[in-house]
Image (cartoon, grey):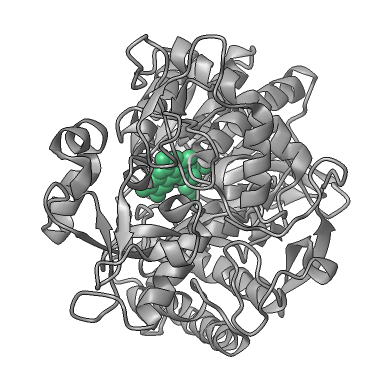
């Protein structure tokens, strides 16, 4: 029997970033009448809206001027003579992934890319343009052609506003500032979620025939991160706790240009537009690490190079742990036209104006390559054999399909969230219109979660949630960062276990029900502790270097033993790892040494 506090919809999407909004918009457009989207923050504040640099698609609209090399000016490619190809985008992505990306999924994403960009255009998205009216494109790291479509450095903002408008037009219902705290899966069938209305503190069971997670990334497990406060990986932890495995969690991307001490992003577009990286002696040190691509080598390589410069004493600022981004030679006009937001961020947060000053930067935790395993239609899978969790879908940064493998290329994630959010929308519509059922729910999951919240308020312990969160972020940054080794990873793992134990004694001071941010912080911290353990367990197990995962005690990529995905299942003793094979077309894209 349905409880009075139970809400029901055909489809519940958790997350109003690009992935969730695309899925909801398409499902509605395809005839599903009752689609609801939950977001813990206002939908338009989702992190997708903070994306700056661009969205990749091999449109071939611009090409570097001949003979000027990677840094030369761009000019429009003549009509009918595209300066790029799908094959080249596929190969760059596979190489960027250090051959851990599933090649069938990568091919699908890249083939869908031009269509998705044109759909954005037809919905009215305000892209920056070439003089002849075509969408302008710029360079990004690891891409061998200028293929980032952009809107100055506000790309995510304009994309998100465009799809949000359309979702409203198609009648999608938004629950703004509702916090999903549990996923209901019984007998491998997803039946709904439990969510809190943050304004009132009321906790509801929400039943649905299909649930989709587009809950974004988990950069907030680190002290220095480019991610918004909301990026606490809730969806990943909630799925894991509901018995869904997690894939490739050890692969965390560190972006080379976070503002010093803050981590706030200076978009890779700074280097795409021709910016340099220099050490404290003024040397463009990338020449020693990636001679051909220089600053536009992929992020894992550039971040490691920066960290090495710092470790060897060539960093700047008071603690010698900063590198510098040099945009001065781009000139005032270009900076104001193409990079107005990053200029403002540098002025506001570190007090330097990139027009005439060097900007101090450092690597910053940026992107989660791992996540909830699913197929190319967003269908979540329960094991390496691909058994579906019926009615449960995921897309965007919380999902792992896997198109980014061990390292994502810049501009491929707005693409991933859009392409696979859209594909999930079509798959969900087919599932619902094909006669999906509303399954009954055993017990009272809302009540279980009310007791969880009550527990934080009445706990006799004295541990502070904030202190535990800070200690977790410190150990993750110090011991599971750009460079890793067994000894430090074991320290991180034992720190996390200790913090998990301390968390059982955590108490929140605010006991009111309305807008209780103490309770939200407690729930988020519990989630950070849950999935951080999986990141470290995967990193400890993977005794090789691949993409963003670099073990100083196990140098070199080890295809014989580690060309496989790690899959973590929750057990009472901690994560249990199994493995899933990588989908490789050995004739077309056999694994190679990765050089730039
Ligand atoms: C500063 C920055 C710049 C970037 N620039 C680029 C770029 O130029 N190009 C590129 O390709 N990529 C870029 N990225 C990465 C890219 O923006 C993200 O990977 C992508 O936007 C993720 O989209 P998403 O839909 O998966 O999640 P998000 O946009 O992060 O949205 C997550 C949603 O989930 C909701 N949510 C989460 N947990 C809960 C919960 N418990 N209950 C209810 N709701 C919840 C949130 O409210 C939010 O609506 C950038 C990232 C950052 C941080």
Q: Position of residue 171 (x, y in %)?
A: 48, 15
| Image quarter where ligand 1 lies | top left
For the C terminus, give its image quadrant. bottom right
In the displayed structure, 471 sits above or below 377; it is: below
Identify the residue at image location x=55%, y=28%: 57
For the N terminus, give its image quadrant. top right
Q: Position of residue 314 (x, y in %)?
A: 31, 78
In the displayed structure, 133 sits above or below 409; it is: above
Identify the residue at image location x=24%, y=45%: 342
Direction from residue 346 to residue 496 in the image, left or right = right
In the displayed structure, 159 sits above or below 343; it is: above
Identify the residue at image location x=45%, y=14%: 121
Quadrant position of residue 572: bottom right
How many labels sit on residues? Answer: 0
Tell me if I can see residue 1 in this picture. Answer: no
Direction from residue 24 to residue 388 in the image, left or right = right
Q: Position of residue 5 (x, y in %)?
A: 52, 40
Who is closer to the viewer here, 517 or 310?
310
Tell me if I can see residue 236 in this picture. Answer: yes
Direction from residue 492 to residue 74 in the image, left or right = left
Quadrant position of residue 98: bottom right
Q: Position of residue 201 (x, y in %)?
A: 38, 50
């Amino acid at each position: 029997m349905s409880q009075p506090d139970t809400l029901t919809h055909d489809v519940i999407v958790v997350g109003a970033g690009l992935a969730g909004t695309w899925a909801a918009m398409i499902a509605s457009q395809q005839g599903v009448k009752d689609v609801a989207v939950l977001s813990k923050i206002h939908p338009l504040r989702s992190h997708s809206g903070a994306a700056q640099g661009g969205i990749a698609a091999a449109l071939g609209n611009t090409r570097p001027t001949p003979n000027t090399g990677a840094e030369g000016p761009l000019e429009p490619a003549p009509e009918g003579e595209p300066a790029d190809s799908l094959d080249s985008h596929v190969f760059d992505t596979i190489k960027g992934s250090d051959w851990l990306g599933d090649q069938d999924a990568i091919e699908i994403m890249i083939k869908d890319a031009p269509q998705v960009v044109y759909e954005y255009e037809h919905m009215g998205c305000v892209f920056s343009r070439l003089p002849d009216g075509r969408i302008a494109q710029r360079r990004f790291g690891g891409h061998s052609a200028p293929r980032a479509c952009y809107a100055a450095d506000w790309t995510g903002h304009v994309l998100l506003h465009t799809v949000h408008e359309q979702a409203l037009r198609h009648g999608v219902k938004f629950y703004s500032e509702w916090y999903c705290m549990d996923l209901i899966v019984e007998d491998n069938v997803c039946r709904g979620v439990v969510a809190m209305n943050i304004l009132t503190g009321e906790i509801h069971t929400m039943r649905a025939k299909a649930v989709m997670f587009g809950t974004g990334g988990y950069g907030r497990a680190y002290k220095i991160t480019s991610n918004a406060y909301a990026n606490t990986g809730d969806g990943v932890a909630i799925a894991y706790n509901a018995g869904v495995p997690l894939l490739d969690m050890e692969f965390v991307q560190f972006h080379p240009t976070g503002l010093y001490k803050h981590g706030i992003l200076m978009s890779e577009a700074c280097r795409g537009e021709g910016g340099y990286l220099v050490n404290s002696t003024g040397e463009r040190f990338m020449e020693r690490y990636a001679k051909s691509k220089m600053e536009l080598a992929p992020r894992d390589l550039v971040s490691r190079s920066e960290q090495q410069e710092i470790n060897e004493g060539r960093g700047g600022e008071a603690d010698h742990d900063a590198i510098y981004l040099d945009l001065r030679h781009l000139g005032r006009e270009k900076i104001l036209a193409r990079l107005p937001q990053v200029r403002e961020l540098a002025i506001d947060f570190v007090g330097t104006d990139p027009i005439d000053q060097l900007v101090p930067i450092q690597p910053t935790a940026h992107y989660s390559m791992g996540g909830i395993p699913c197929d190319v239609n967003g269908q979540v899978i329960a094991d390496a054999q691909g058994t579906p969790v019926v009615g449960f879908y995921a897309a965007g940064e919380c999902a792992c399909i896997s198109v980014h493998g061990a390292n994502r290329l810049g501009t491929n994630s707005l693409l991933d969230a859009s392409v696979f959010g859209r594909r999930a929308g079509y798959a969900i519509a087919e599932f619902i219109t094909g006669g999906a059922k509303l399954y009954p729910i055993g017990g009272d999951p809302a009540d279980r979660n009310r007791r969880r919240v009550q527990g934080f308020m009445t706990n006799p312990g004295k541990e502070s949630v904030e202190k535990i969160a800070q200690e977790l972020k410190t150990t993750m940054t110090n011991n599971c960062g750009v460079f890793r080794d067994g000894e430090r990873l074991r320290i991180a793992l034992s720190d996390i276990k200790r913090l998990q134990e301390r968390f059982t004694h955590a108490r929140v001071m605010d006991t009111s029900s309305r807008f209780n941010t103490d309770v939200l912080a407690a729930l988020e911290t519990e989630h950070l502790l849950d999935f951080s353990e999986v990141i470290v367990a995967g990193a400890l197990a993977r005794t090789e270097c691949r993409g963003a995962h670099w073990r100083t005690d196990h140098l070199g990529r080890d295809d014989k033993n580690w060309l496989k995905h790690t899959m973590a299942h929750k057990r009472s003793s901690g994560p249990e790892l199994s493995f899933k094979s990588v989908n490789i077309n050995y004739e077309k894209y056999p694994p190679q040494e990765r050089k730039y």
